[in-house]
Image (cartoon, rainbow, N blue to C red):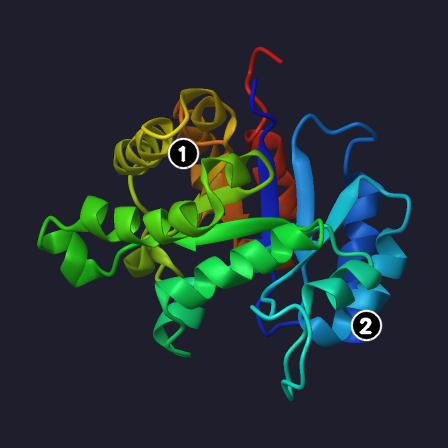
Amino acid sequence: MRRPLVAGNWKMHGSRAENARLIDELLANIPAEPLATCVVCPPYVYLQEVGRLLRDSVIGLGAQNVCADPTGTFTGEISATMLKDVGCEYVIVGHSERRLVYRESDQLIARKFAAALGRGLVPILCVGEQLAEREAGRTCEVVARQLDVVLELCGAGAMEQGIVAYEPVWAIGTGRNATPEQAQEVHAFLRDRIGARDARIAAATRILYGGSVKAGNAAELFAMPDVDGGLIGGASLKADEFLAILAAAVPGDE
């Protein structure tokens, strides 16, 4: 059975004081042995300090981005080796803000996925369509293209270590979210897409949903058979909300 995972993407939020308060609240209230994996992804400048606060805890540390090149003279970039060195286990690649605002191509994102794998990090690959693409009936075409470039570069076997996150762009930070049925439809499509290359790996691949997930809608989203947890934005900045989402990721019969 796939172990659910809930990751908090803090984006460009936080301060040393705010981060310490949030981590204190999370650690004081998270179960000693949670049935879902919990990860937080702070901004780069806080990774080492948050990692120190999380040391020997049940909460994993992730980064929000990574350089596609393992070494080199790239001003302002952070390599996968550096992320590993400060305690990261996970890294987000291909978030829609990286794709749309910073114009990262599918090919660059696939290289970032490969760079993360090459240094023992678990890449969380974000895919998702814009509103106009959904309204035009192109959702599956868009997410297939975004996924296929990674599969072609890294092979289906890479998904044994990687994670996919479906984030419809029109639902990120808008207060709108896909219905459970809409999410399930795309998650099933993505799993089938991987399954066309390797059915065993597809069955084991965790596929998260992201896009205005909160405590009030998490349970019905996570109840879908192909939704294995969530990549959480704003709600991950509130300890009680994030912990409620984490609890919602655990199947009721566990």
Tag of residue 221? 1
Q: Is residue 43 above or below residue 162?
A: below
- Residue 61 can be seen in this image: yes
Earlier residue among tags 2 and 1: 2
Quarter of the figure with residue 191? top left
Q: Residue furthest bottom?
A: 75
Q: Secondary structure at mark 2?
A: helix
Residue 76 rendering spot, x and y as whole percentages: 64, 85
Residue pictured at 27% horizontal, 52% vertical: 145
Crowding at dot 2, Cα within 10 Å, few <14 / some 14-19 / many 20+, comes out as few
* Type of amino acid at the residue the image marks with label 1: Leu
Quarter of the figure with residue 74? bottom right
Residue 40 rendering spot, x and y as whole percentages: 68, 53
Residue pictured at 59% horizontal, 74% vertical: 12
Quadrant of the image containing the C terminus:
top right
Which of 247/156 is in front? 156
Q: Nearer the viewer, mark 2 or mark 1?
A: 1
Residue 144 rendering spot, x and y as whole percentages: 28, 46
Quadrant of the image containing the N terminus:
top right
- Residue 234 can be seen in this image: no
Residue pictured at 15% horizontal, 51% vertical: 138
Q: Which residue is mark 2?
A: 17
